[in-house]
Image (cartoon, coloured by chain):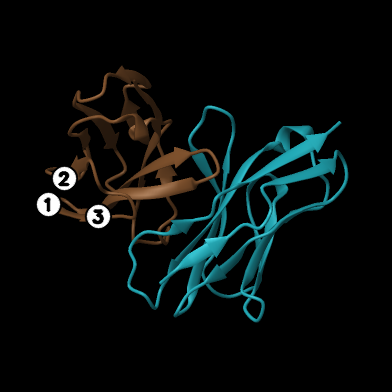
């Protein structure tokens, strides 16, 4: 049981480039989320999904796209990277069962946009 | 709408002393409350949660938190701090009356335990 995995761990992009941050979980969780963590800002929700085929925007969705074709995977796409997207990105998953929305986090992806 | 505030950016405590990390929340219905810990260069780890029932919740690593509905608070406590408790702590709330699927996190409090 690997939990929540994220790839890559580190990434450097140039302004205007696109890329996909991968997230996968093997716990059969319905809910998955993407957060960004910036100093002094805490965790801010980018996008989330309550099940395969269902996604919605969080607090800071601009410049990011998501899709959820399977229960296991929830990739985050940066369409045209900007320096303001330099951050640490965390994926999380949770279930609406007995765990009552306790979230499991991946190890994070540190992204730098130059 | 749901929101949570952690009024202290940093808490300093000596090893062996009790520690408190503060959290207040705002919801329209009943809250689900969570504490998470983040060690350097790691993802967040779940510590404890309040759903219903006893106002004093016990969690991992000897931490506990007290739910106070009248003060809308959920402070994290530990009777005797360890240097290894030094980390970033996040409070989170989910509003059961607001229909939100995902909790909102506070900005985090850096706990520094001095030897």
Give the chain letter at badge 1.
A
Pointer 3 local density, CA inside 10 Å: few below 14, some 14–19, many at least 20: some
Q: Nearer the viewer, residue B104 or B81?
A: B104
Taking the image as shown, residue A49 lies to the left or right of residue B92, namely: left
Q: Which residue is mark 1?
A: A53
Q: Which residue is mark 3?
A: A57
- Residue A1 visible to the viewer: no
User: Whole-Å distance between the Cαs marked 3 and 2?
Assistant: 13 Å
Q: Which badge, 1 or 2, is on the more N-terminal residue?
A: 1
Element class at badge 1: loop
Relative height, residue A100 to residue B62 (above, below): below
Q: Chain of mark 2?
A: A
Q: Position of residue B48 (x, y in %)?
A: 58, 55
How dense is the environment of label 2, judged by Cα within 10 Å: few (below 14), some, or many (20 and up)? some
Labels 3 and 1 positioned on one and the same chain: yes
On the image, numbered disc 2 is attached to which residue? A68
- Asked if residue B13 is positioned above or below residue B6 in the image, the reply reads above
Q: Which chain is cyan?
A: B
User: Which chain is assigned brown?
Assistant: A
Count of labels in the image: 3
Mark 1 crowd level (few <14, some 14–19, many ≥20, 10 Å Cα)? few
Circle 3 or circle 1, nearest the eye = 3
* Mark 1 vs mark 2, CA separation in Å: 5 Å
Instruction: Classify the position of the C terminus of chain A by image quarter.
Output: top left
């Amino acid at each position: 049981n690997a939990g929540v995995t994220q790839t890559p761990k580190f990434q450097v992009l140039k302004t205007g480039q696109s890329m996909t941050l991968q997230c996968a979980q093997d716990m059969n969780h319905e809910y998955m989320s993407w957060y960004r963590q910036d100093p002094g800002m805490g965790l801010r929700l980018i996008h989330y999904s309550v099940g395969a085929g269902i996604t919605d925007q969080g607090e800071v969705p601009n410049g990011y796209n998501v899709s959820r074709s399977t229960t296991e995977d929830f990739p985050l796409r940066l369409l045209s990277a900007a320096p303001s997207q330099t951050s640490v990105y965390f994926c999380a998953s949770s279930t609406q069962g007995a765990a009552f929305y306790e979230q499991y986090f991946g190890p994070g992806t540190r992204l730098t946009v130059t | 709408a749901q929101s949570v505030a952690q009024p202290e950016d940093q808490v300093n405590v000596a090893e062996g002393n009790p520690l408190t990390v503060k959290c207040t929340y705002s919801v329209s219905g009943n809250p689900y409350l969570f504490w998470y810990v983040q060690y350097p260069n790691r993802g967040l780890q779940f510590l404890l949660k309040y759903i219903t029932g006893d106002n004093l919740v016990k969690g991992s690593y000897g931490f506990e938190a007290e739910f106070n509905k009248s003060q809308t608070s959920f402070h994290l406590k530990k009777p005797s701090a360890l240097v290894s408790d030094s980390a970033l702590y996040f409070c989170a709330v989910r509003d059961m009356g607001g229909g939100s699927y995902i909790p909102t996190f506070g900005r985090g409090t850096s706990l520094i335990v001095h030897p």
